[in-house]
Amino acid sequence: KNQVEQSPQSLIILEGKNCTLQCNYTVSPFSNLRWYKQDTGRGPVSLTIMTFSENTKSNGRYTATLDADTKQSSLHITASQLSDSASYICVVSPNYGGATNKLIFGTGTLLAVQP
Amino acid sequence: DTEVTQTPKHLVMGMTNKKSLKCEQHMGHRAMYWYKQKAKKPPELMFVYSYEKLSINESVPSRFSPECPNSSLLNLHLHALQPEDSALYLCASSHPLGGEGYTFGSGTRLTVV
């Protein structure tokens, strides 16, 4: 069964600190992996997208890594800011080879950055 | 323009009302999607349109009726909803092959009373 699991479920850090969120997936065949940031009551906003051949992708203070062999990804946030408080969702796109783009969502990590 | 615009942002409707949610994108995407998201849960796919034709209906009750009038617009018509249908409704769009450029709108917060 195609699944995406994230850890931890929730995390509290102090402003200015770094943190790393984890994502493990069992999706096969695999097309790409995305990390989204979702503020409460708002739509998800894309942070990074990686294909199976990419190991790392950065977007400002966000750096995602991918190990396609172990089916693991991480999202590292450096120098956290209060505005980083949100849910971070790992999303995997299976490679069905057609026009069916059914994304598989993780349950998210809820990050709270405190002053 | 790299946005998916959803209107309204908030909607409160009674169980006997008929209302519509609207979604618009001008990124040239030919796949558009409706999702339903309950609090603290991941989005659940409802419908997929590819080249303006319905390609996926995830066994959604008929009180939700999607419509894709052209390549830029996607509507979700609502009728006789139940309180448990209260949720955040998200629209998304992407290239139809491979899902490149998958972009979500900011959502419509629907409350059914």
Image (cartoon, rainbow, N blue to C red):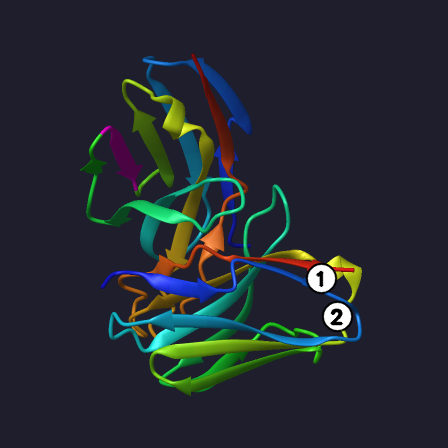
Q: Name the residue under label 2.
A: B81
Is residue A63 shown in magenta?
Answer: yes
Residue B110, image x, y percentages: 64, 59
Q: Mark 1 points at which residue?
A: B85
- The dominant secondary structure in magenta is strand
Residue A99 seen in this snapshot: no
Tag 1 near tag 2, CB within 8 Å: yes
What residue is rendered at 43% in x and 36% in y? A23
Which x, y percent locates residue B101?
27, 61
The image quadrant where one finds the C terminus of chain A is: top left
Q: Tell me the chain of label 2.
A: B
Residue at 27% over, 32% down: A62
Q: Is mark 1 on a helix, strand or loop?
A: helix
Q: Which residue lies at the image location 55% right of the left edge and 42% below the top edge?
A: A107
Stretch in magenta: A61-67
In this rendering, is residue A18 above or below B66? above
Q: Is residue B110 left or right of residue A15?
A: right
What amino acid is found at the position of numbered circle 1 in the picture? Asp
Q: Is residue A5 above or below residue B98?
A: above
Reply yes or no: does residue B79 show up in magenta.
no
Query: CA separation, marks 1 and 2?
Result: 6 Å
Vertical position of residue B82 compared to residue B63: above or below? above
